[in-house]
Amino acid sequence: MNLKQFKSMENKKIIVSKKEVDLYKKLIENSYTVDPVEKKSHRKLYNELQTAFLLEISEMPPNIVRLNSIVTIQTSFGRKDGIQLVLPEEGDLGKRKLSIMSPMGSALIGYQEGDEVIWNLPNGEDKIKIEKVINGINVV
């Protein structure tokens, strides 16, 4: 299956680099969170990784959300510009750095500019619209 065929599939799968998929799985498997929303978000991402469309880093489209991506998103809480997805130990919302293991961060991984994704909240679910994705050099 090529990327064009993949994008036209009705049941959307996430797109992840072969190098990053193991990192994401390891972070989830080693997570000790007791927060039920985080646990649900981690399970959702883990399940998506099981069926993800895996590519070499050199084949990754530039508009896919991944580690170190800088995104602009729209939620029911408003627009957020220039949020960078980072490893958990680097997360600091005051510096616009969102952990990939947070409910919002894990919801965005593997999706692309223009997608709407489900975000787990304590009161249920909400949608996130990915308006812009910027990728530079990813270190994995």
Image (cartoon, rainbow, N blue to C red):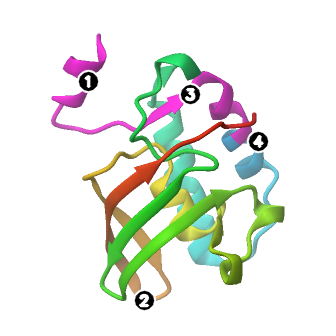
Helix, strand or loop for disc 3 = strand
Amino acid type at mark 4: Lys
Task: Looking at the image, tell me whether mark 4 or mark 3 is earlier in sequence order.
Answer: 3
Q: Dot 3 corresponds to which residue?
A: 17
Residue 19 is drawn in which quadrant? top right
For the N terminus, the quadrant is: top left
Task: Looking at the image, tell me whether mark 1 or mark 4 is earlier in sequence order.
Answer: 1
Measure the C-alpha gap from mark 4 to mark 3: 15 Å
Task: Looking at the image, tell me whether mark 2 or mark 4 is earlier in sequence order.
Answer: 4
Measure the C-alpha gap from mark 3 to mark 1: 15 Å
Helix, strand or loop for disc 2 = loop
Amino acid type at mark 1: Phe
Task: Looking at the image, tell me whether mark 2 or mark 1 is earlier in sequence order.
Answer: 1
Measure the C-alpha gap from mark 3 to mark 2: 32 Å
Helix, strand or loop for disc 1 = helix
Q: Dot 1 corresponds to which residue?
A: 6
Q: Are circles 2 and 1 on residues that touch, CB within 8 Å?
A: no
Counting from the top left corner in percent of width and height, residue 50 is at 52, 33
Measure the C-alpha gap from mark 1 to mark 4: 26 Å
Task: Looking at the image, tell me whether mark 3 or mark 1 is earlier in sequence order.
Answer: 1
Measure the C-alpha gap from mark 2 to mark 1: 33 Å
Highlighted magenta segment, given as a residue range = 1-23
For the C terminus, the quadrant is: top right
Counting from the top left corner in percent of width and height, residue 124 is at 39, 82
Nearer the observer, disc 1 or disc 4?
1
Q: Which mark is residue 26?
A: 4
